[in-house]
Image: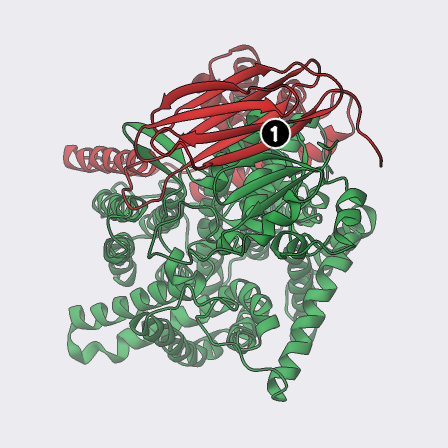
């Protein structure tokens, strides 16, 4: 039996034969998970075909994937190996839910951006190109670099490479999280429950599964934590081995995602301080803290100074928004409401489930804190988990301040790691308290709690009306037809070669990828006002010229500025089918400029086609 | 004597995978060899080098192999960016093979003369029923993916037709594209011409949903002139359905 000689008390003993000779419930639960995935796929096919707007099959599919696994994880029969495999299955199957929603093209706002970067690397054989949508992203080339390895060596598309990469990262994420919880908590059962709870983090199902740099960096952060805790528990002669992935991971994260690298640095600094204060009888991790600071800070100075201009306004706006909302100067944001739109209003029942999930997490946290404090009050990482758990509930408050919502949402996925660990103890406590109900009923009760957390997290993490697929490419008379903005992107890919566009946000995303054009949108430069206004202001043409934006896309669909909803076919009665006044495109018709595309709602003007 | 944990096998596997990825033009084959080459082998070798004769248990070995391979892929691009040739197929293959082979060599040296500290365990027993469940699960998952990638009719979705026109970069002609994303077949009338040239070129055609027709229309150019393309639906010939314009010939006037 292979063990670490200087292990913490009650650390699990690992065996080389992971599954101890048998598969347990793995085959059956794999079948359930596949069935659940199929149900989600059927649900998405029905919404894509506009046959229904019902999400029932989708939610049933989600529960079919998760609940049987939750049941097994809350029991005592499964071995360590089986729990680990089930966690990996859960993580991969839930990634599959996102993948089958968007299995034709990327649909998420940031995915277009990163796919464009990956394609630019392949086209130019170099990093650090320009990205008109999110200029900071090429400065953190880790994701693009890894994707280009797959693209160059296999010939697959950026879409396929992105899916494979994030699936691999997802498997690494949940596996590493399980192993961290296992090592620190001393129980594979607690670890499995903890990771299962983490799937209820609001960004886990969709946001964290998109092809974006944080989706690669956050899993690597957890892997670094795993290597760190194993190093702690290992005999001295093993420590150099574990130091390698810690060091490699710190550097890799620094070049992949800004916030994750700063979070990692803060984590190691906090651990170093706690080790000192608590006089922990293990080597202080200050060298890792120093490396993390040097790596993150060094990359910022060497390659990514724009990060400051990118992040500081977001953070200062968030802080300002908190104070203004608290002081009553700004109205609080309605939770479950997306920006100013009336779209995506979450039904009352769904809101109830999401709020219930938070309440249950709070209960689990309070119960878990009692247990965790008793057992781990001198364990720095567990204390940090506790602080993170408190931070999660604090970050929820940010959701009420309009400009701080995103900051709170993104911080939540880091803090939830700590909450999941602490709450796992609470779930076990809940099960113990419910024991008078009977063994099966008490187990069913906690599984129900975990299911509510999963569904509640999914509800809070993504607008209700776009949880499921919408028609992007459909079949008509046996042929495929594309939505209006997608058709423009496909045409531009065939006919234009990396041309520069000004466009509404959703059109711009599709023009980036799959269109392969350089498309600007938003307010930096101020394209938004150009494409939405009915009058041509004196500053507009000079701005387009200065930025060398030859082509201007005018999209009458009001939804074209919405990077979650603006890509699809118009379905009368579904969503926002309002149109801007004709003036938005007639102002360009009055110019001596060419109009090179007309698809009814979308027009493209060529400012260089003139007399 | 080699064992299944012999790092030399890993190095050899990397060389073979890289050679196939570079040399074989069949995408499916390249995908099969690229996945281990990018996502497993370099990390496995590096972990083996780091731990020497100490053999990690299966979950740790697999996790670290996967994660370290991702880290190497992340950092590898930054290294290649400064190399001659940059980030291309050959350089990626060379880099990943080099990292794997060097790490395997280090691992082999560190293990020399020191047997693995590894214990055997129970042989995994997989029954027919369990195999059947895995097979069924795989089939269902594949069906889910195929379903997800299949476009279905969406009768409520509003179709459209797109008209596009670009001047040829040289010469006096325009390329006109008519793209049908309608739900049913449509008949169209296309008129292309300039005011100066008199009668426009007229084309009549029908398009099925998803069909595109591309027409090259030479235009007799006498100085710079505006070219208009107008599309009508055959069943509504008096209403302009789509309209595009461009300019051809001569040189642009003014700033």
Which hue is chain B drawn in? red
Determine which residue is flagged by label 1: B107
| Above/below status of A386 relative to B110 | below
Mark 1 element type: helix
Question: Mark 1 Cα within 10 Å, few/some/many (few <14, many 20+)?
Answer: many
Farthest residue toward the bottom?
A327
Q: Position of residue A443 (x, y in %)?
A: 22, 68
Closer to the camera in the image, B171 or A243: B171
Farthest residue toward the right?
B255
Q: Position of residue A255 (x, y in %)?
A: 70, 46
| Image-based side of A380 in relation to A102, left or right | right
Quarter where residue B76 is shown: top right
Q: Is residue A293 visible?
A: yes
Q: How many marks?
A: 1
Quarter where residue A252 is shown: top right
Q: Position of residue B71 (x, y in %)?
A: 61, 40
| Above/below status of A266 relative to B115 | below
Which hue is chain A drawn in? green
Q: Residue at x 81, y 44 (%)?
A: A546
Q: Residue at x 32, y 39 (%)?
A: B148
């Amino acid at each position: 039996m292979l063990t670490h000689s200087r292990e913490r008390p009650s650390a699990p003993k690992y065996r080389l034969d992971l599954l101890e000779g048998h598969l347990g419930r793995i085959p059956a639960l794999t079948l359930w998970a596949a069935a659940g995935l199929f149900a989600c796929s059927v649900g998405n096919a029905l919404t894509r075909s506009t046959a229904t707007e019902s999400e029932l099959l989708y939610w049933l599919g989600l529960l079919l994937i998760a609940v049987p696994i939750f049941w097994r994880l809350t029991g005592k029969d499964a071995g360590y190996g089986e729990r680990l495999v089930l966690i990996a299955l859960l993580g991969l199957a839930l990634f599959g839910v996102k993948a089958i929603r968007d299995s034709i093209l990327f649909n998420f706002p940031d995915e277009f951006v990163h796919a464009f970067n990956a394609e630019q690397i392949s086209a130019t054989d170099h990093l650090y190109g320009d990205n008109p949508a999110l200029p900071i992203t090429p400065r953190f080339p880790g994701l693009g670099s890894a994707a280009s390895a797959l693209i160059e060596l296999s010939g697959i598309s950026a879409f396929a490479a992105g899916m494979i990469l994030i699936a691999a990262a997802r498997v690494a994420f949940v596996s590493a999280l399980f192993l961290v919880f296992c090592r620190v908590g001393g129980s594979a059962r607690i670890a499995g429950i903890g990771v299962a709870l983490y799937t209820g983090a609001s960004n886990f199902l969709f946001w964290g599964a998109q092809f974006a740099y944080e989706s690669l960096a956050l899993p690597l952060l957890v892997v670094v934590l795993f290597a760190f805790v194993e190093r702690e528990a290992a005999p001295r002669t093993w420590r150099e081995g574990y130091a390698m992935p810690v060091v490699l991971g710190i550097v890799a994260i620094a070049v992949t995602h800004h916030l994750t690298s700063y979070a990692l640095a803060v984590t190691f600094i906090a651990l170093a301080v706690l080790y000192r204060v608590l006089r922990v009888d293990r080597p202080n991790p200050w060298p890792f803290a120093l490396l993390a600071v040097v790596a993150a800070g060094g990359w910022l100075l060497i390659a990514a100074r724009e990060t400051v201009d990118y992040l500081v306004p977001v953070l200062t706006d968030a802080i300002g928004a908190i104070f203004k909302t608290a002081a009553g100067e700004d109205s609080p944001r309605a939770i479950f409401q997306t920006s100013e739109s009336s779209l995506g209003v979450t039904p009352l029942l769904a809101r109830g489930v999401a709020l219930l999930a938070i309440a249950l997490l709070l209960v689990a946290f309070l119960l878990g804190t009692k247990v965790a404090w008793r057992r781990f009050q001198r364990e720095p990482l567990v204390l940090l988990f506790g602080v993170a758990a408190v931070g999660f509930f604090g970050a929820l408050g940010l959701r009420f301040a309009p400009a701080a919502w995103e900051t709170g949402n993104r911080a939540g996925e880091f803090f939830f790691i700590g909450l999941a660990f602490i709450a796992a103890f609470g779930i076990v406590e809940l099960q113990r308290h419910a024991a008078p109900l009977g063994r099966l009923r008490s187990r069913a009760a906690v599984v129900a709690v975990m299911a509510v957390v999963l569904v509640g997290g999914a509800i809070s993490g993504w607008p209700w009306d776009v949880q499921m697929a919408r028609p992007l490419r459909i079949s008509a008379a046996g042929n495929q037809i594309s939505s209006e903005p997608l058709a423009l992107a496909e045409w531009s890919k065939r006919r234009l070669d990396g041309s520069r566009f000004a466009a509404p946000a959703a059109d711009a995303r599709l023009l980036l990828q799959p269109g392969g054009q350089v498309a600007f949108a938003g307010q930096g430069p101020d394209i938004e006002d150009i494409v939405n206004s009915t009058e041509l202001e004196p500053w507009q043409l000079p701005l387009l010229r200065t930025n060398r934006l030859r082509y201007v896309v005018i999209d009458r669909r009001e939804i074209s500025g919405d990077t979650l909803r603006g890509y699809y076919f118009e379905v009368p009665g579904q969503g926002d089918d309002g149109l801007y006044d004709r003036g938005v495109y007639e102002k360009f018709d009055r110019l001596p400029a060419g109009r090179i595309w007309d698809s009814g709602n979308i027009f493209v003007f060529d400012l260089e086609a003139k007399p | 004597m080699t064992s299944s944990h012999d790092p030399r096998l890993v190095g050899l596997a990397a060389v073979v995978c890289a050679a196939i990825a570079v040399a074989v033009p069949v995408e499916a084959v390249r995908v099969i060899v690229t996945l281990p080459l990018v996502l497993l082998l370099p990390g496995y070798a590096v972990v083996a080098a780091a731990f020497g004769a100490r053999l990690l248990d299966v979950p740790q070995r697999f996790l670290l192999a996967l994660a370290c391979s991702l880290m190497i892929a992340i950092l590898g691009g930054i290294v290649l960016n400064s190399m001659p040739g940059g980030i291309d197929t050959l350089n990626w293959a060379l880099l990943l093979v080099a990292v794997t082979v060097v790490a395997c060599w280090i691992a082999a040296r560190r293990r020399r003369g020191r047997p693995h500290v590894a214990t055997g365990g129970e042989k995994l027993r997989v029954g027919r029923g369990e195999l059947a469940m895995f097979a069924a699960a795989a089939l269902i998952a594949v069906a889910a993916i195929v379903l997800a990638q299949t476009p279905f009719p969406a009768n409520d979705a509003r179709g459209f037709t797109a008209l596009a026109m670009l001047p040829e970069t040289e010469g006096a002609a325009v390329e006109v594209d008519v793209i049908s994303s309608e739900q049913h077949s449509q008949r169209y009338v296309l008129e292309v011409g300039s005011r100066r040239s008199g009668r426009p070129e007229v084309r009549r055609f029908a398009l099925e949903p998803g069909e595109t027709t591309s027409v090259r229309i030479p235009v007799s150019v006498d100085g710079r002139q505006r070219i208009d393309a107008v599309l009508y639906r055959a069943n509504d010939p008096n209403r302009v359905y789509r309209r595009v314009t461009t300019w051809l010939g001569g040189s642009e006037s003014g700033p």
